[in-house]
Image (spheres, grey):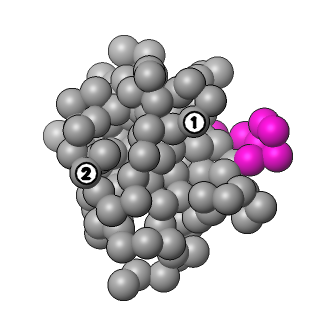
Amino acid sequence: MADPKRTHRGVLEFALGLPDAYEDHPWGETVVKVGKKIFVFLGNDESPTWPSMSIKLRESHDQALALSGAVPTGYGLGRAGWVTIPFATRHPPLGVLTDLVEESYRLVAPRRLVARLEELATG
């Protein structure tokens, strides 16, 4: 099983590599935003679910909830499609997690940034 802290760092590094993404710390937690919108919550080491990530999903929502330990995100976010995936339990490879982060980014980012992401992907 992969090191949960290494997975956490890998997800954070991937998210920060997306167009115009930046790290912020509202409520003392690590989040990654595009514009003013959060697309991934990464919590803090005092969070009961740390290390974990919470992402907004549409297409992969049901598949993400089927992952070991995954639950709808609290604070009412689960009703809006947010899923929390813990890294301390058995979790999918980093590539699967980053695909989910990218889906979340695409749901909240402005169209021009999603288009830029498409351009980067096609080279």
* Residue type (three-letter) at the residue carrying disc 1: Gly
Q: CA distance from mark 2 to mark 1?
A: 17 Å
Find residue 111 and report its horizontal and vertical position in percent.
36, 15
Instruction: Please state if 118 lies on the left or on the right of 102 as rendered.
Output: left
**Pointer 1: what residue?**
74
> Would you place residue 57 above or below residue 64 in this image?
above
Q: Is residue 55 magenta?
A: no
What residue lies at 51% left-to-right and 38% top-to-bottom?
Answer: 73
**Pointer 2: what residue?**
66
Tell me if residue 119 can be seen: no
Q: Are marks 2 and 1 in contact (CB under 8 Å)?
A: no
Find residue 26 and report its horizontal and vertical position in percent.
78, 36
> Would you place residue 120 above or below residue 97 in this image?
above
Find residue 103 and report its horizontal and vertical position in percent.
32, 36
* Residue type (three-letter) at the residue carrying disc 2: Ala
What residue lies at 50% left-to-right and 72% top-to-bottom?
Answer: 88
Instruction: Please state if 28 lies on the left or on the right of 88 as rendered.
Output: right
Q: How many marks?
A: 2
What residue lies at 81% left-to-right and 39% top-to-bottom?
Answer: 27
| Residue nearest the viewer, comparing 123 with 46 | 46
Say whether disc 2 or disc 1 marks the residue closer to the N-terminus. 2
> Would you place residue 22 above or below residue 12 in this image?
above
Q: Is residue 20 magenta?
A: yes
| Residue nearest the viewer, comparing 115 with 27 | 27
Rendered-image quadrant of the C terminus: top left
Q: Secondary structure at mark 1?
A: loop
Rendered-image quadrant of the N terminus: bottom left
| Residue nearest the viewer, comparing 91 with 26 | 91
Q: Which segment is the magenta one?
A: 19-29
What residue lies at 53% left-to-right and 58% top-to-bottom?
Answer: 52
Could you classify mark 2 by the number of other residues whose Cα lies within 10 Å: few (under 14), some (14-19), or many (20 or more)? Answer: few
Q: Secondary structure at mark 2?
A: loop
